[in-house]
Amino acid sequence: MSTTKLILLAACLTAWCGRGALAETAGKLPAELEGIGITEKLGDALPLDLAFVNEAGKPVTLGELLRPGKPVVLNLGYFGCPMLCGLVMNGMTDAMKETSLMPGEDYIVLSISIDAGETHRLARIKKQNYIREIGRPAASTGWHFLTGSEANIAALTDAAGFHFKWIEDRREFVHAAGVIILTPDGKVSRYLYGTTFPAQTFRLSLVEASEGKIGSALDRFLLFCFQYDGENHRYTLAAVNLVRLGGLMTLLILGGLILRSLRRERRRKDHHGGTETRREELSVES
């Protein structure tokens, strides 16, 4: 099977991987794809003490790159990937460009190579290209491109549920397509699958992971009205919340009408009482 077909098939299987269907159909897959996929580990904390090397050649731990209140986009792949990784990063970049949230100011992006043979020099070139593409120079402070040892890569990908494989005869890695959204303290909040990410889903995932610490009041309102659909990997209208919201609005409207009625009745009584008092005063004077 050609490398291109392997990569495309891995991408197509991504949605199945998140639900564990890959394991159920493993017998029908090419041997190269067995064990490839994503096992969702929502709520699990990643090992933030793992050391990597940033694009400047400086050793850093994951924990050193996180910031209070800022969610994280974890992008696992490798910088020398001939196809799929580039598609994922391009899709992620498009989503970043379509939102008003800014890497560095509102959230952190970690693009981490799963190839222990790659160096910070290649990471630096990739960073320069993508910062130029996103058109926001300030984003360079919040988008980190990292390389690391095989042991630390394995520890991170295992904790994140990201399973990949090296195909020796092709000299390439095979892996699924997607990004992982983390909370500011490094816990898995959401998996976004595929090579394209709708701007609203991307934005709301970040707002949700930050627990409302970033984004607008409208974003927080939308999170109440929408819930994440794990089957289709996007936010959809939440019927229960809409019913609750409708009930709340009904109560508010009724409350407003009652309050308005009470105020009218009070004004009427005050006016009537004032008229009677004036009549009594006139009677006394006469």
Image (tube, rainbow, N blue to C red):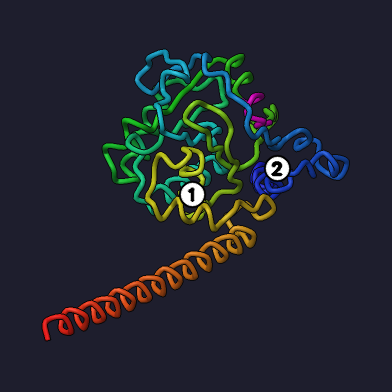
Q: In this rendering, would 93 be left or right of 232? A: left
Q: Quadrant of residue 56?
A: top left
Q: Residue furthest bottom?
A: 286
Q: How many marks?
A: 2
Mark 1, residue position: 204
Inspect the image, locate mark 2, and give the three-letter code of the amino acid beneath it: Gly
Alpha-carbon neighbours of circle 1 within 10 Å: few (<14), some, or many (≥20)? many
Alpha-carbon neighbours of circle 2 within 10 Å: few (<14), some, or many (≥20)? many
Is residue 246 positioned above or below 87 on the image? below
| Pointers 1 and 2 in contact (C-beta within 8 Å) | no
Q: Secondary structure at mark 1?
A: helix
Q: Is residue 159 rendered magenta in the image?
A: yes
Q: Please name the residue shown 66% across and 41% down the image.
A: 3
Q: Earlier in the sequence, mark 1 or mark 2?
A: 2
Residue 246 location (% of width, % of height): 55, 66
Q: Which residues are magenta?
A: 157-163
Q: In this rendering, would 283 be left or right of 270? A: left
Inspect the image, locate mark 1, and give the three-letter code of the amino acid beneath it: Leu
The alpha-carbon separation of the residues under discs 1 and 2 comes to 20 Å
Q: Is residue 80 visible?
A: no
Q: Nearer the viewer, residue 255 or 161?
A: 255
Q: Residue furthest right?
A: 27
Q: Nearer the viewer, residue 52 or 108?
A: 108
Tag nearer the camera, 1 or 2? 1
Is residue 84 positioned above or below 238 on the image? above
Q: Please name the residue shown 49% across and 70% down the image.
A: 254
Residue 265 location (% of width, % of height): 38, 75
The disc placed on residue 18 is 2
Q: Please name the residue shown 40% across and 71% down the image.
A: 262
Q: Nearer the viewer, residue 81 or 43?
A: 43
Residue 221 location (% of width, % of height): 46, 55
